[in-house]
Amino acid sequence: MASQSPVDTLGSHAPAVRDLIVEVVQSRHDRVAEAHVTSGSRYAMLYSTLWRDLLVDAKDALVDRGFQSRKLSPAGYELPVVNDCLLYVWRVPGAPHAVSEFASSSTRKNGFAVPPPDPMLFEPDLGNVLESDADDASEDTDGANLERLVRAVGDTMPLVLIMVHSSPRQLQSIEWAVAVLDDAGKVKLHGHEAIWEPEVDVNDAASDVESFDSGTPAVPSVELQKQEDTRPDA
């Protein structure tokens, strides 16, 4: 399990969950950033509450679509459960070892030891199944349910850590990975990849730059200047 990526862990739900999480993060960031700017505060204390809103927003969005949630003690954070996997949306602070120290609190540490839900409780399907593909989809669902039954015996749920890099000025990137807690209490990431980054308009960025592979370079004209003789007369 530790070597899997979020796509492997979330299974057929991965594309829809990715799109939903990106939408949730963008919406929350825009609202909190606007409130920060409107307040005119010189400090980022208002913006710093984003981390808790992200947890609640992600949980609500997925629970509204029929998924379960699990509460982490002692703080009581509720995390959504998709395909027997916990999702934790987290704004990464600026500390150099923030990711490896993610499990520094007892609540976050407990997120790595949560047993899966009742394997007989099947999950909703976020995708759209065409009528012509109904038989194939049914077979895939049966196989996935059997896999869940096998995996749930004496197991704990993997934790997909969704990392938000941002400032009040800009949402910089959204990444996800399967987080694993090692024996030293440090967090390691598997299948780490970006699921959203701001688009860069290459045409605008290079519109004023002349190509190096065509044309003739302009050579500055240099005119020799006559140097005055400053030697004293003999």
Image (tube, helix red, strand yellow):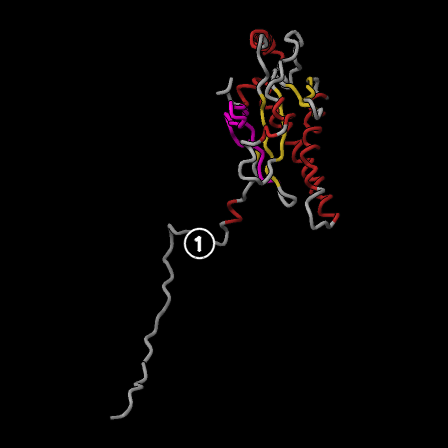
Residue 67 in the image: x percent, y percent?
Answer: 68, 18
Q: Is residue 226 left or right of residue 51?
A: left
> Nearest the camera: 173 or 199?
173
For image coordinates 59% across by 21% down, the residue present is 112
Report the predominant secondary structure element of the magenta stretch. Answer: strand
Please count the marks in the image.
1
Residue 167 in the image: x percent, y percent?
Answer: 63, 43
Q: Quadrant of the C terminus?
A: bottom left
> Nearest the camera: 62 or 136?
62
Q: Is residue 184 left or right of residue 48?
A: left
Q: Residue furthest front?
A: 184
Residue 34 in the image: x percent, y percent?
Answer: 71, 44
- Which amino acid, mark 1? Glu
> Nearest the camera: 129 or 182?
182
Q: Is residue 214 above or below residue 72?
A: below
Q: Residue furthest right?
A: 39
Disc 1: CA contacts within 10 A as few (<14), some (14-19) or many (>=20): few
Residue 103 in the image: x percent, y percent?
Answer: 59, 28
For image coordinates 65% across by 35% down, the residue present is 26
- The answer to which quarter of the image holds residue 160 is top right
- Dot 1: element: loop
Reading the image, the residue beneath label 1 is 210
Q: Is residue 137 above or below residue 229?
A: above
For image coordinates 75% across by 48% down, the residue present is 39
Q: Residue furthest bottom?
A: 234
Q: Is residue 206 magenta?
A: no
- The answer to which quarter of the image holds residue 86 is top right
Q: Is residue 178 magenta?
A: yes
Residue stretch rendered in magenta on the structure: 171-195
- The answer to which quarter of the image holds residue 218 is bottom left
For image coordinates 58% across by 41% down, the residue present is 94
